[in-house]
Amino acid sequence: MTLADRVPPVDLDLAALPPSSAFRRWLAPAMFAVFGLVDIFVLGLYAHHGDATFAFSQPFAKVTVPNLTLPAAVTCYVCGALSLAMAALRAFLPFGVTLRRVTIGVVIFLLVLALLCWADAGLATSFNVVNQLQGTFNDSIPIMLGALTGVVCSRSGVINVGIEGQLLLGAFTAAIVSSVTGSLWLGLVCGALAGSLVAMLLAIFAIGYRVDQVVLGVVLNTLILGITGYLYDGLMVPYGNTLNSPPTFSAVRIPLLGDIPIIGPVFFDATIFLYITYIALAGVQVGLFSTRWGLRTRAIGEHPSAADTVGIPVIAMRYRNVIAAGLIAGIGGAFFTIGSVGSFSADMTSGEGYIALAAMIFGRYTPFGAIGAALLFGFTTQLQSILSTLNTPIQSNLLLMAPYIVTIVVLAGLVGKVRGPRAEGIPYVKA
């Protein structure tokens, strides 16, 4: 008897698949079709007469790029037709992982383009693409840093639901330290340490005492929310001039690179927090996939007992990784105060720690994927701000909801099944 005779044939018929697999197969094409129909029958039919103008240069830029003018209604129809074509192709043709992600990006881009054409049609003001991209990166900084924190923790086998608390305590500590000392750098360091402090509590209870990690993360978030809210009312409100008036980091423009059209103002004319994000992304990506530390980290997140048998200290390494990752989240929290608004307010993170956790899942537990998902949320946040200034006929409350709606739609309808590290959330007990 040959090997082929012993192995049963695999039935690839769709009817033989589990109901969840069949549902997943048709979910993304259905979402593509919905987006296409919205482009045509909502944005295209109700677009004002006239053209939409897109500007690619800021005022007083040394090098300028000509504006792009598109017929609003026609562009919406074309975007809708392309999205419907993508839906048909995705439904009936086999797509690899990379091609599936490309089609998701293309359909989202077409929806955004149609939305912008609808909003800017017939207006005298142009939509500035550079301002949109600058705001996208600025709004995404704490989410990107929080998502990188989640990637390191999850790859180590620990679910970090406490990112929200790390961001919040980092923001509070950076504000009060910078206000008292007048030193931005000291505030940044203390904000990072505050995030690491929350991570230390997470590590002690999750790894040492084997508490349920999801429940523990929610408890820590609630604890930090209560502590910072109490201290804000008791200290910062009555003594705001001395305890809640920190300076803020100014934008640092890199010579020559900052003058490159479009990408220069976006990537090379920002605060120190964006440059720290570049370093953190490169460090996590290279560290996880090109170093011995990364190999060991992935080992303790996938199969800790096997890692233990070859001499890797699973418990100690999980402690170190979780606490070190907390520094990244603490820096993200400091951005809220000394990198942005210049003051602390109660619950100012507004759930962005949970968004960072969703971005990590959307990014399939990879650094670049998590950053891309965080940028999607930041793009939506900045877009709703600009749309509100264009007097679009959408209620302000719906515009404020847009980033969260996009997050839910993308996670539920476009991402598909995501498998995290096998040992994620499972306490390790040494034999």
Image (cartoon, rainbow, N blue to C red):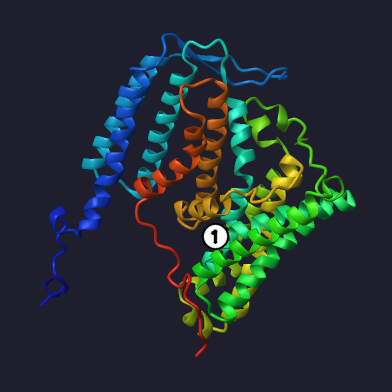
Left or right relative to 391: residue 273: right
Identify the element where label 1 is drawn: helix
Q: Residues within 10 Å of mark 1 (few under 14, many from 20)?
A: many
Using the rendered image of the protein, determine whether residue 49 is visible from the camera's viewpoint.
yes
**x and y percentages locating residue 296 in the rendered image:** 56, 72
Residue drawn at (60%, 69%) of the image: 292
Asked which quadrant contains residue 101, the reply is: top left
Asked which quadrant contains residue 190, the reply is: bottom right
Front in this rendered view, residue 200 or 308: 200
Residue drawn at (73%, 46%) of the image: 337
Q: Which residue is denoted by mark 1 in the rendering?
A: 151
In this view, which residue lies farthest toward the right?
181
Residue drawn at (61%, 27%) of the image: 130
Residue drawn at (73%, 43%) of the image: 339
Front in this rendered view, residue 157 or 220: 220
Left or right relative to 213: residue 86: left
In this view, which residue lies farthest toward the bottom?
431
Asked which quadrant contains residue 409, the reply is: top left
**x and y percentages locating residue 30 in the rendered image:** 27, 40
Tally of numbered tags: 1
The N terminus is located in which quarter?
bottom left
**x and y percentages locating residue 187 in the rendered image:** 80, 53
Using the rendered image of the protein, determine whether residue 317 is visible from the camera's viewpoint.
no
Q: Is residue 161 above or below residue 85?
A: below
Front in this rendered view, residue 124 or 397: 397
**x and y percentages locating residue 223 in the rendered image:** 63, 65
Amino acid under label 1?
Val
Q: Is residue 84 above or below residue 369?
A: above
